[in-house]
Image (cartoon, grey):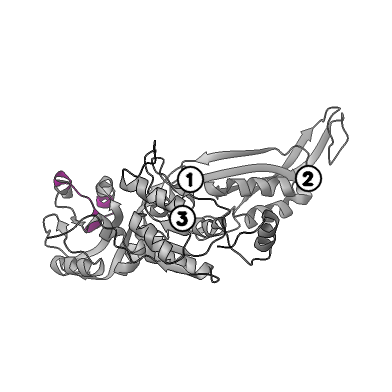
């Protein structure tokens, strides 16, 4: 890897001749913003410097020591991993555990590690959409939509500036509701203010009462865009002191959340359905609840451990729920209302890395995006 002075690196970055770790992160977070990861999770850049120049990217499900070896062999100094190798806090780095050995080797070879995990679980085009694509499901929607991920901005602007500010907010990602964009609510009225001796009003005089014809603008926006929205206000509002309010809504976000529901093109017999799932998900073994002797068409899916979503799957009216890590008593929860299908944790998430490679390959063309060939499944079948 070439070494440049800081000024040279900044110059090269500005002319797009090199790409740094942060550039790749930006592309990944377009797909799955970290703001939507679960609170218990450990996502983002876990090892490395976000300003490091990229030589290549290896995309894997897990960052084991063997995966780091693969990255070294492929000359990749960034591993994009679905699961975080560091989940609980590390108190020492002695190489005593598989986690410590992987992290030590990555640090030794200047390899950065970035994890997406539940941010990608909750993304509309994430893990569960990839399963749906594998099964060719249509009419897809989120199984358990997140709440408190939509925010509302209200601000007050001189009437003559309202259109300019609205457009700036729209361009920053505000005002999108489902299939509609440029959504806002506007009320005409009068604002009053009186600046003190230290003020510098853009309209009116200091220490004099002023009344201004204003427009009250209200828009909603996804919470991960809050800083961009606020920057748009302060950059495009003429007032010295900008009055605004940001509130968090309890509305369910139909584009962010765990699991997904979709439909097969044609209903299938239960036996044929399981054979279809086994083949499509490349599962060596499938566990399932009792057959219901009815056709399967509407399906709920949730990659990884999904027992917590069984009741939600029932409420959708799905005939089957595909997930992983179901325990003995979980299967009783089917209650003859749907077919529970456990395809295995690795099997349910293994195609996630293919989706990430496809996403990055569309965005990046000046170096290799490599799909890891290492099978990291710790579960073996006899």
Is residue 27 shown above or below 107?
below
Q: Quadrant of the C terminus?
A: bottom left
Residue 362 point in image, percent of width and height? 50, 70
Instruction: Give the mark count.
Output: 3
Q: Which mark is residue 238?
A: 2
Q: Which mark is residue 149?
A: 1
Magenta-colored span: 313-330
State which mark lies toward you, 1 or 3.
Answer: 3
Residue 372 point in image, percent of width and height? 37, 65
Q: Quadrant of the N terminus?
A: bottom right
Residue 319 part of the magenta segment: yes
- Which residue in the protein does label 3 denote? 109
What element does badge 3 sit on? loop
Residue 20 part of the magenta segment: no
Horizontal placement of 254 versus 155: left or right?
A: left
Q: Can residue 72 be seen in this snapshot?
A: yes
């Amino acid at each position: 890897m070439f070494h440049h002075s800081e000024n040279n690196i900044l110059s090269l970055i500005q002319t797009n001749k090199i790409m740094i770790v942060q550039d790749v992160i930006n592309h990944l977070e377009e797909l799955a913003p970290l703001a939507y990861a679960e609170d218990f999770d450990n996502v983002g850049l876990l090892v490395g410097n976000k300003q490091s120049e990229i030589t290549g990217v290896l995309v894997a499900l897990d960052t084991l020591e063997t995966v780091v070896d693969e990255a070294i062999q492929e000359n990749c100094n960034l591993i994009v991993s679905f699961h975080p190798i560091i989940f609980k806090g590390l108190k020492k780095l002695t190489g005593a555990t598989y986690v410590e050995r992987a992290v030590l080797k990555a640090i030794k070879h200047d390899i950065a590690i970035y994890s997406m995990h539940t941010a990608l679980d909750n993304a509309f085009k994430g893990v569960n959409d990839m399963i749906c694509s594998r099964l060719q499901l249509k009419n897809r929607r989120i199984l358990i939509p997140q709440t408190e991920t939509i925010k509302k901005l209200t601000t007050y602007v001189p009437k003559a500036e309202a259109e300019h500010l609205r457009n700036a907010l729209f361009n920053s990602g505000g005002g999108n509701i489902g299939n509609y964009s440029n959504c806002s609510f506007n009320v005409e009225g009068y604002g009053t203010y009186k600046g003190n001796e230290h003020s510098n009003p853009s309209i009116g005089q200091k220490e004099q009462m002023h009344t201004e014809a204003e427009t009250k603008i209200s828009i909603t926006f996804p919470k991960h865009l809050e800083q961009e929205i606020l920057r748009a206000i302060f950059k495009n509002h003429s007032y010295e002191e900008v009055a605004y309010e940001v509130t968090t809504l309890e509305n369910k976000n139909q584009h962010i959340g765990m699991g997904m529901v979709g439909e097969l093109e044609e209903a299938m017999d239960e036996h044929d359905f399981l054979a279809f799932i086994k083949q499509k998900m490349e599962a060596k073994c499938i566990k399932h609840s009792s057959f219901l002797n009815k056709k399967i068409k509407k399906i709920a899916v949730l990659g990884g451990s999904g027992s917590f979503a069984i009741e939600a799957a029932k409420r959708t009216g799905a005939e089957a729920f595909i997930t992983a890590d179901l325990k003995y008593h979980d299967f009783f929860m089917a209650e003859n209302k749907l077919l529970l299908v456990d395809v295995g944790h690795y099997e349910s998430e293994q195609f996630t890395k293919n989706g990430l490679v496809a996403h990055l390959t569309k965005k990046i063309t000046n170096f290799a995006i490599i799909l890891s060939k290492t099978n990291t499944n710790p579960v073996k079948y006899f």
